[in-house]
Image (cartoon, rainbow, N blue to C red):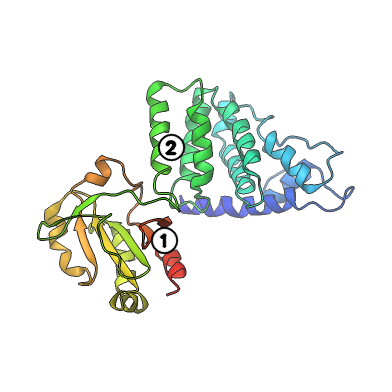
Amino acid sequence: MKGRFCNRFVWAFVLTALLVCQGNAGQETDMKSRQTVVSGQKQAGEPQFPFPEIPSDLTRPEDRKEFLLKHYWDNFDFSDISLVDNRNISEQGFVNQIALLADGDTDVELVRQSLDNFCSGMEKNIHARRVFMEMAYDYLYSPDSPFYNESLYLIYLKRMAESKVLGEVQREAVIFRIKLISRNLPGDKAADFNYYLSDGTERSLAMTEVKGSHLLLVFYDPECESCHEVLAQMTDDRALAEAVSQEKVSILAVYTEGNAESWQKTLADMPSDWLVGEDRLAIRTDALYDLKSMPSIYLLDKSKRVVLKDTSYEKVREALHL
């Protein structure tokens, strides 16, 4: 999976440069030529993604980009199973689109229109709908994806929630994910929950004292390999240890998987100046936080507002200037 992501990333980056960073009018290559240059390995006559033909009277890069994004999927036949299943065409086409949408310069309304163009095409065919909905999840919502982008994914989900062709169960799943992603956004007050210390003492996030300017909230599972790696990185970080000991930062680590015996066995591995508790499955039961991968790290300010949501420890260190 990671190898595929990397390959798609390189191709999408080149396509973004070739499609958007246009030269002067009259110096532009046609779409077919650009496709051949982008692939670098395509043979003559091999099927290509059917990009829309941009009108020649659109000479400004921003106008060409707007037309391309609004009509990106116009020429793609979603009823052609062999075309949908040809990942060098369908998947690469999708990756190129989201690379353009996530370039930081695309207006939100244009993003919506482009994703509507995508959804309007794929939703009408059951096979295409299954393939592309899975693709959207993998690329925009999977933490392993270099294109991970909850904002784009949320716009896409809101459009799919309006679809007339989804079954009730599928629609409810989409709506549930919208609600989950929409919780604990940066700037929001972090959702409150109760947790229990090793001696059984019950506490709540809202009533937890924050010593210093920030609270580092870590949801973890001691049986998770990636949790071991991140927690080891944190416990070995002398700058973080110093910040905690000097009461500049507080850390609350919460076990969320419900096996109290397993949790108790690993408590000795946790730093003594961290608050460590278990939630007895309350967070997952009530879907209070989006725990799609572990560990899940949130950086909160002193008033428990979210600064960084489901982030990496590297980004936490940058935010805390460690």
Circle 2: residue type: Ile
Mark 1 crowd level (few <14, some 14–19, many ≥20, 10 Å Cα):
some
- Residue 40 shows up from this direction: no
Q: Nearer the viewer, mark 2 or mark 1?
A: 2
The one nearer the camera, 187 or 267, is: 187
Mark drawn on residue 312: 1
The quadrant holding residue 98 is: top right
Taking depth in this image into account, of 262 and 47 the one nearest to the observer is 262
Seen at 56% across and 39% down, the residue is 87
Residue furthest to the right in view is 26
Residue at x-position 31% and y-position 44%: 288
Secondary structure at badge 2 equals helix
The spot of residue 117 in percent (x, y) is: 63, 31
Residue carrying label 2: 178
Residue in the picture at 38% in, 51% down: 189
Find the distance from the CA under tag 2 to the CA under tag 1: 22 Å
Q: Looking at the image, is mark 2 or mark 1 earlier in the sequence?
A: 2
What residue is rendered at 83% in x and 40% in y?
A: 58
Say which quarter of the image contains residue 84.
Answer: top right
- Identify whether 112 is placed above or below 171: below
